[in-house]
Image (spheres, rainbow, N blue to C red):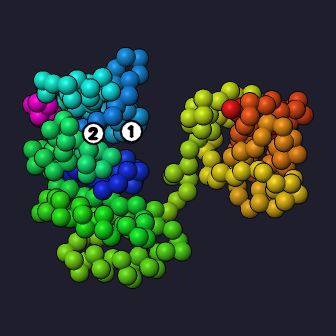
Amino acid sequence: MKTLYISSAETFSGKSALCIGLGQRFKKDGLKAGYMKPVNVNCQLQDGVPYDEDVAFAKQIFEMTEPFDLLSPVALTPAKLAQQLRGPETDFLPKLKEAFEKVSTGRDVMVLEGGRSLREGYVAGLPPKRVAEQLGAQIMTVHKFDEALMVDRAMTAQNYFGDLLIGLVINEVPKAHAEFVAETVVPFLRRHGMNVLGVLPQERLLSAPSVRELGEGLHAEILCAQECYDELVEHMLVGAMSADAALTYFRRKPNKAVITGGDRTDIQLAALETSTRCLILTGNLYPSPQVLNIADEQCVPVILT
């Protein structure tokens, strides 16, 4: 059995998406693939138990029947983190090894998702390199495109992981920078002994939040069209100009959320004339019935914050 640990030097680099993509590919190739997120230092509670959306989604995609506590064996909620800091400290390694042994049994390959960065896990005694060493994993890092810091982050990962690192992936490369990455960045990294396994182009849809996620993040009230709450938002625009000027901008961006004051009926109507996924109204000011009627007919959720 092979074990692959996906890590990164920074947050929101695309680790979860890469894990899912690899799992789908392994499955297509006829391999029995499993998934784990060994360490999560900031795990939230849902219905009184630790819960991680990434783990829940991966469990579904990988078609795994194992319970959550095996797929994410070291999940430190705020309470558990505080207990670890106060002491006595818990040795989580036996629990991690036991869970890995159970989940990996009968599988050809295991995909392990690392924490938010190379720095996560020390408080539990399980930083990324130790996790990989203890579970016999090879490491792949993923780095989100950043013209200034991307190369330094890749070299930091190389210095940290050493021979455990088998290669890296550069993620979310904008089309305008594709040539620069291919002709300048990749050759530089290879000259310095790094194996660039892939360069993935930016795809806005993959990083688009849903209207529901926006509403939950804002603790907002849904005023209409709740049945369209799961539509994806690819662009965010602020309507703070005249309606005529706003239309010029609104027409350029499809599938957008428009943020504007609840009393700006002109901006709201202008947004509804174009490809809009939701209206986010600020100031806790309710819109006019005309706006709500049109939005409801067009299935454009209006959320109030």
Three-letter amino acid code at disc 1?
Asp
Q: CA distance from mark 1 to mark 2?
A: 9 Å
Horizontal and vertical percent position of residue 274: 80, 52
Element carrying mark 2: loop
Q: Is residue 136 left or right of residue 149?
A: left
Q: Where's the C terminus, which quadrant? A: top right
Residue 113 appears anywhere in the view: no
Three-letter amino acid code at disc 2?
Lys
Give the quadrant of residue 214: top right
Mark 1 in CB contact with mark 2 (< 8 angstroms): yes
Q: Which residue is mark 2?
A: 37
Horizontal and vertical percent position of residue 41: 28, 36
Find residue 54 and name its label: 1
Give the quadrant of residue 135: top left
Q: Is residue 296 left or right of residue 110?
A: right
Q: Residue 46: say if magenta.
A: no
Vertically, is 150 above or below 257?
A: below
Magenta highlight range: 91-97
> Residue at horizontal 77%, vertical 50%?
239
